[in-house]
Amino acid sequence: MDFDKDRGCFVCGPENATGLQADFSCDKEQLKSFCRLVIEERFQGWQAIVHGGVIASLLDEACIYAGRALAETLVTAELSVRYRKPVSVGQEVTVQGEVVDRRRKVLRVKARLEAAGELCAEADAKVFLLS
C-alpha cells in the first residue's frame, strides 16, 4: 500500500480547514516531537471539555512526529491512552512525544499532553517505519 503525502491530515494538515492544524516540530537528534496549541470549542465532547478522541489523535500524532527522524512514512500499530484529567476547550496545551525503544522497523513511543503544567493524558504506542 502506498501512502501519498498531502496536507489534509485531520490533526496536522494545514489545508484541512475543519481539522486541528497542529504544528508539530521534530527534534531529530533526541527523537522527540513538540506542539503547543489551543483546542477550539468545536472539538468538545461534554460541555466545555475536549473530546477524548481528539486528545488521543494529538497523542498519536506526537508519536508519529517523534519517529520522523528515523523515517519519513510511519503508521501506528497500537496506541494505548490513559486519561488523567479533563482538558478544557480554549485552553493552551502542549503535546510531546519521545521514541523510547527501536527494534528494527518498530518503535515504541511515549507521548503526553499537558495543560497549565499538569499531565492530562499520556500514551504508549507501537509505530512501524515504512520508509
Image (cartoon, helix red, strand yellow):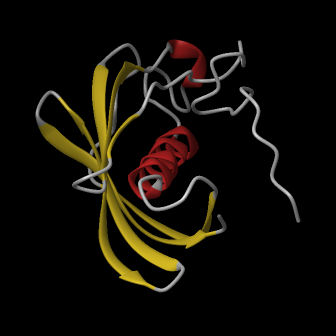
Q: Of residues 129 and 60, which is closer to you in this image? A: 129
Q: Nearer the viewer, residue 99 or 22?
A: 99
Instruction: Specify the quadrant that holds the C terminus.
Output: bottom right
Residue 113 is drawn in which quadrant?
Answer: top left
Q: Quadrant of residue 95?
A: top left
Residue 103 vs 115, above or below: the answer is: below
Side of 2 relative to 69 (left or right): right
Q: Position of residue 21 (x, y in %)?
A: 56, 21
- The spot of residue 103 in percent (x, y) is 43, 87
Task: Please tell me which residue is depicted at 59% across the width and 33% down the height of the picture.
Answer: 11
13 above or below 30?
above
Q: Is residue 32 above or below residue 101?
A: above
The outermost residue toward the left is: 117
x and y percent of residue 128 in the render? 58, 72
* Total tally of numbered discs in the picture: 0
Q: Pick the residue in front: 111 or 6.
A: 6
- Quadrant where the N terminus lies? bottom right
